[in-house]
Amino acid sequence: QVQLVESGGGLVQPGGSLRLSCVASRSIYSIYDMGWYRQGPGKQRELVAVISSGDSANYADSVKGRFTISRDNAKNMVYLQMNSLKPEDTAVYYCNARIFERLQLINYWGQGTQVTVSS
């Protein structure tokens, strides 16, 4: 099991940048992959970016070229650098971890951090 805590959200103008952080309660070396999801007003939760233990990253088409996911295993942290933010990026952003347990990949979630992009 793992507990996840996000931080770094806030209010930013269109075109601005934010960096989200997620700290895990245990070493992330053994975590299968970690990612960021978001849920905007009236929308379903969607994948933003995911990074594997081998640092292979995948992104939603809507954020490619603007967002970068990274990890610092020594600090048990995962980051999401968000550049060129758009109003449609407004959402609660959730940190996610998948852990292989008893032959299954189990999802763990943080409580979320609000990102608001508005002029």
Image (cartoon, grey):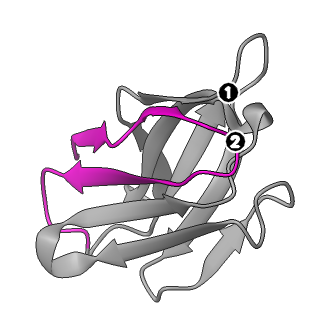
Q: Quadrant of the C terminus?
A: top right
Residue most extreme to the front: 119
Q: Is residue 85 left or right of residue 64?
A: left
Asked if labels 1 and 2 touch by Cβ distance under 8 angstroms, the answer is yes
Q: Is residue 76 above or below residue 36?
A: below
Q: Quarter-wise, where is residue 56 in the image?
A: bottom right
What's the residue type where badge 1 is placed? Ser
Q: Is residue 10 left or right of residue 8?
A: right
Q: Is residue 110 magenta?
A: no
- The residue depicted at 19 percent of the width and 66 percent of the height is 76
- The residue depicted at 14 percent of the width and 71 percent of the height is 75
Label 1 crowd bin: few (<14), some (14–19), many (20+), radius 10 Å: few
**Bounds of the magenta segment:** 1-28
What's the residue type where badge 2 is placed? Pro
Q: Is residue 4 magenta?
A: yes
Q: Secondary structure at mark 2?
A: loop
Residue tagged 2: 14
User: Which mark is on residue 42?
Assistant: none
Residue tagged 1: 119
Residue most extreme to the bottom: 54
